[in-house]
Every structure is written in C-alpha cells, then in structure tokens.
Image (spheres, rainbow, N blue to C red):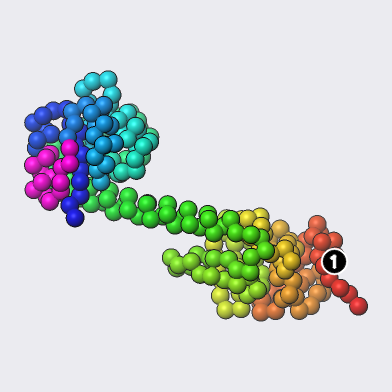
Amino acid sequence: MAVNILVTEDESIVRKDIERSLQKLGYHVIGTADTGEKAVELALKLKPDLALMDIMLKGEMTGIEAAEKIKSQIDIPIIFLTAYADEKTLSKAKITEPHGYILKPFKEVDVQTSIEIAIHKHKKESELKVENEFLRSLSRHKTDADYLFVKSKSRLVKLETSEVIVVEALKDYVIINTPDHKYTIHSTMKDIEKKLPERVFQRVHRSFIINMDKIEAIHSANLVMQGYEKDVPIGGSYRDAISDRINVL
C-alpha cells in the first residue's frame, strides 16, 4: 500500500517538484499546503501517514509550530524540509521530535531514504507504545497473584511465582532467579516487591527478596536457598521481620 504524504511548502515551484518526486518514487501525495494553518487543517482532516513540512513558511505560523499542533492531536511522523541548517533553527525544530530532516536542495534518494527510515522508526515506536501499555496493564495485577509475566528475548514469559527462588538487585535492574533461568529486567526492588505475594515472599536485604518456601538453612545471619548458588545475607533492619515468620523448635 502506498504511503500517504502531506506536503507543506510555500514555494509553489518547489512544492510541485516535491510532488513529482514523491509520485515517481511510488508515494501518494494526499494533500498539499502552503501555510502552517492549512497544513494543520489538512493533517487533521486527511490523516496522512507522514508529513513533509518546510520549516520556514510564509504567514503567522512556522512549520515548527504547525508540527507541534499536528503532533498534539494525531500521531504521525514528520520530516522537516529546510534550507537552514543552523544550530538555532535545528534546536527549535528538535522540540517537536521530528523523524528526520531533508536539506534543500535535495536529491530523490535522500527523500526516499528519509521517508522509509521515518516510517520504519514510527512503526517500531508505535509497537513499543502498545507493548508498554500492555505491560503496564499486567503490572496492575493483584499482589496475591500466583504468576507474573517477565520479558525475555522480546517475549512475555509467564512465570509461576512459586518458581522464583531469589530476586536480586543489580543497579537499575533486578535478576529473578528460578531453578532453570535467570531473568534480568529493568525494574526496582520496591516495584517487584509489590508484585510478589506477601504470603510467600520476604524482603531480607536492600538487595534481596526471597521465597520463604525455598529456605534450606540459616547460619551466621545468612540464608541458604534451595537451588541458589550463594548465601543470601539478612540485613539488620529486616531481621525482626523474617524472625516473625520463622518457626524455631
């Protein structure tokens, strides 16, 4: 399916040249505008797949301002057309988070490359937004759930909480240890602690959460965990909490 493109350029000769180039490359020019106001109107009406926007437009609204208005209402990639590559202009343009720049005078290969990269990047960003929203919805499950989902190699793996032995902090990540796997995810211990059932799991150190059912032995303020290769220290501020949960004969 051809990509629908909105072209905004106030110089009619340049605008027609862009149209011809896009059509030659197999794209569909869904509409054209010569002012920022017209660009916003057409974008909201036609819902293009991508917008090519000249930065410096005649009239009260610049291409940068038009891009801001468009992106505040519809999620489409925008590529700026500009003869001005100075730092001040580009700094202003960056605020709108464009998907590319094409410098005038341009070559058809530059136009095609910029469009294809922008479309691909936007698609991946959209997929990531959907995935993140899905992950957020999963993260809202009840704290007494018997399972959680862990991202591993671009997949969401269902993990029974009973399989978790130890959760260990590693800077901005946590490592979830099970008998067969280690899952490294971007999270905090505080967030993980909220998602694990309190009836089974206990924070024993600022860097460790353990499955109480997996404790094999306790010695010298350390825990020996079933299926875990090293001892887990018990932090001083957590000793009372874990003592309250252990029956000693």
* Closer to us: 116 or 28: 28
Q: Position of residue 150 (x, y in %)?
A: 53, 66
| Few, some or many residues within 10 Å of mark 1 (<14, 14–19, 20+) | few
Horizontal placement of 1 versus 64: left or right? left
Horizontal placement of 68 versus 18: left or right? right
Residue in the picture at 12% in, 39% down: 18
Q: Position of residue 232 (x, y in %)?
A: 72, 69
> What is the residue that sits farthest to the front in this orientation?
45
* Closer to us: 208 or 142: 142
Query: In the image, which residues are magenta?
Result: 18-31
Q: Position of residue 121 (x, y in %)?
A: 32, 52
Residue 119 among magenta residues: no
Q: Quadrant of the C terminus?
A: bottom right
Residue in the picture at 13% in, 45% down: 22
Q: Which residue is mark 1?
A: 243
The secondary element bearing badge 1 is classed as helix
Q: Is residue 217 above or below residue 25?
A: below
Residue 25 among magenta residues: yes
* Closer to us: 234 or 80: 80
Q: Is residue 246 above or below residue 37?
A: below
Q: Position of residue 125 (x, y in %)?
A: 37, 51
The reply to whether residue 101 is visible in this rendering is: no
Horizontal placement of 234 versus 46: left or right? right
The reply to whether residue 147 is visible in this rendering is: yes
Residue in the picture at 35% in, 55% down: 124
| Residue type indicated by callout 1 | Ser
